[in-house]
């Protein structure tokens, strides 16, 4: 029998954040790869109660083998205080969840491989000389104490998975041996894109114009995602229908206020994962307008939207940043533009909309890379590496 695997993630499940979608898809891909998988996540306040089946359906995980899932208690009063005072309660929530997860792993999963997204959980386990513990890092912490913890834990971990080359570089600079690090970018769920309607039917389902050029952005609306630049591009492209799908409620309202009076911009808010695929199928072009700061945008991110565009062969205009150049190549499988400039973004969008042959070539090249970037392919690479260590 294949070895059991436990995935530890301090994620609100379900939620509107891409982090939770990534966690769900990673766990499901490990289960499909033949390793009985248990997902341990945080039980957060003001989160809908779901059965395991409802949770996996929410994240469009295909029917068939699905992981076990367990919500663990933590001290959670983050949302009871204003955002500017949330640092301390957020740290308390993280630490109490991490400790609960470490206890649960030791209690119920004595022989399992452990992949933790939480440094403190990994640190607690390896301090108890627990073998087979891996840490997934999405950015190296900036604080001296947590950097010290990371370096101490890395010396005893079985290995570290970095979500991008930028994260790997920072780990090496910190002192983590290069040979102990695997870079594993995000991916996409193939089943969500397997039976999409054609472009006309997708537009009809979403109430979009059948003939107008359509540009879509799918994903979060944090300021470093650069959607404000897309709003300005929409103002400059009145003949183009621009659609934004995704984001937390407060961010959606902020973007709607910014976009007041831009009649060709539609902001649809958060969409369930299976519906996001419809937006991509309906579009002529996708955009990834990340800003050059902070470092999570320029160096660390591995955007789900890029891999989902691969799944449908949707050509992309994206910011020319190190994080995106790891995945995309200018005028080979995407069109890269200088970041932080609505004018440059507008020029990139117009260049591809006015050049259908180039647009088709870029989309086909992107689609050709899709098989190596779905979650199942990622799971096989990660598991082979973990088992070899």
Image (spheres, grey):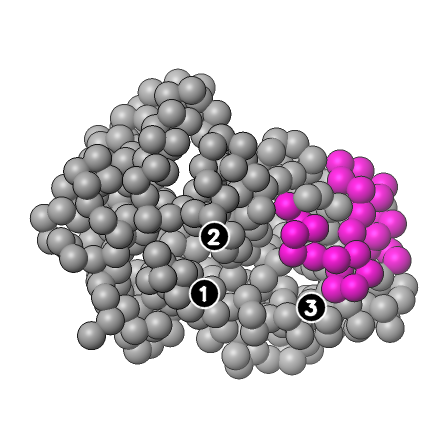
Q: Position of residue 99 (x, y in %)?
A: 20, 35
209 falls in the magenta region: no
Crowd tier of the residue under label 1, counting other residues whose Cα lies within 10 Å: few below 14, some 14–19, many 20 or above: some
Is disc 3 placed on a helix, strand or loop? helix
Position above or below: 214 against 49: below
Between marks 3 and 1, how big is the CA–CA gap? 20 Å
Report if residue 53 is visible in the image: no
User: In the image, what residue occupies the spot 36% across and 62% down?
Assistant: 388
Q: Quadrant of residue 360?
A: bottom right
Q: Quadrant of residue 295?
A: top right
Q: Which mark is residue 366?
A: 3
Residue bounds of the magenta highlight: 323-351
User: In the image, what residue occupies the spot 53% across and 55% down?
Assistant: 185
Q: Nearer the viewer, mark 2 or mark 3?
A: 2
Position above or below: 74 against 233: above
Is disc 1 placed on a helix, strand or loop? helix
| Residue pointed to by mark 2 | 182
Check if mark 2's residue and mark 3's residue have beta carbons within 8 Å: no
């Amino acid at each position: 029998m294949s070895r059991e695997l436990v995935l530890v993630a301090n994620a609100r499940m379900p939620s509107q954040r891409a982090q939770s979608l990534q966690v769900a898809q990673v766990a499901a891909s490990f289960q499909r790869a033949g390793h009985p998988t248990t997902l341990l996540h945080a039980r957060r306040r003001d989160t809908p109660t779901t059965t395991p089946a409802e949770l996996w359906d929410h994240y469009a995980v295909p029917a068939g083998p699905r992981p076990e899932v367990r919500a663990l208690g933590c001290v959670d009063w983050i949302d009871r205080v204003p955002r500017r005072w949330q640092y301390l309660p957020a740290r308390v929530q993280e630490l109490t969840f991490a400790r609960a997860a470490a206890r649960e792993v030791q209690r119920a999963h004595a022989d399992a491989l452990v992949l933790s997204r939480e440094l403190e959980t990994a640190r607690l386990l390896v301090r108890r000389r627990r073998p087979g513990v891996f840490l997934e890092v999405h950015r190296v912490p900036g604080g001296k104490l947590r950097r010290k913890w990371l370096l101490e834990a890395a010396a005893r971990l079985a290995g570290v998975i970095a979500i991008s080359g930028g994260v790997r570089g920072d780990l090496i600079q910190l002192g983590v041996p290069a040979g102990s690090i695997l870079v594993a970018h995000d991916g996409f769920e193939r089943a969500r894109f397997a039976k999409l309607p054609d472009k006309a039917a997708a537009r009809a389902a979403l109430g979009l114009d059948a003939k107008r050029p359509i540009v879509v952005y799918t994903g979060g609306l944090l300021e470093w995602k650069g959607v404000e630049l897309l709003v300005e591009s929409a103002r400059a492209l009145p003949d183009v229908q621009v659609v934004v799908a995704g984001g937390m409620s407060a961010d959606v309202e902020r973007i709607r206020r910014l976009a007041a009076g831009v009649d060709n911009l539609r902001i649809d808010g958060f969409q369930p994962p299976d519906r996001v695929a419809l937006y991509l199928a309906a579009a002529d072009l996708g955009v990834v307008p990340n800003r050059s700061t902070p470092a999570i945008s320029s160096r660390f991110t591995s955007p789900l939207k890029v891999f989902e565009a691969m799944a449908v062969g949707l050509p992309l205009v994206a910011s020319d940043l190190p994080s995106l150049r790891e995945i995309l190549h200018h005028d080979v499988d995407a069109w890269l533009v200088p970041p932080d400039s609505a004018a440059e973004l507008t020029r990139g969008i117009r260049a591809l909309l006015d050049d259908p042959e180039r647009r088709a070539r870029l989309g086909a090249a992107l689609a050709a890379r899709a098989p190596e970037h779905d979650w199942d392919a990622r799971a096989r690479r990660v598991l082979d590496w973990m088992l070899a260590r």
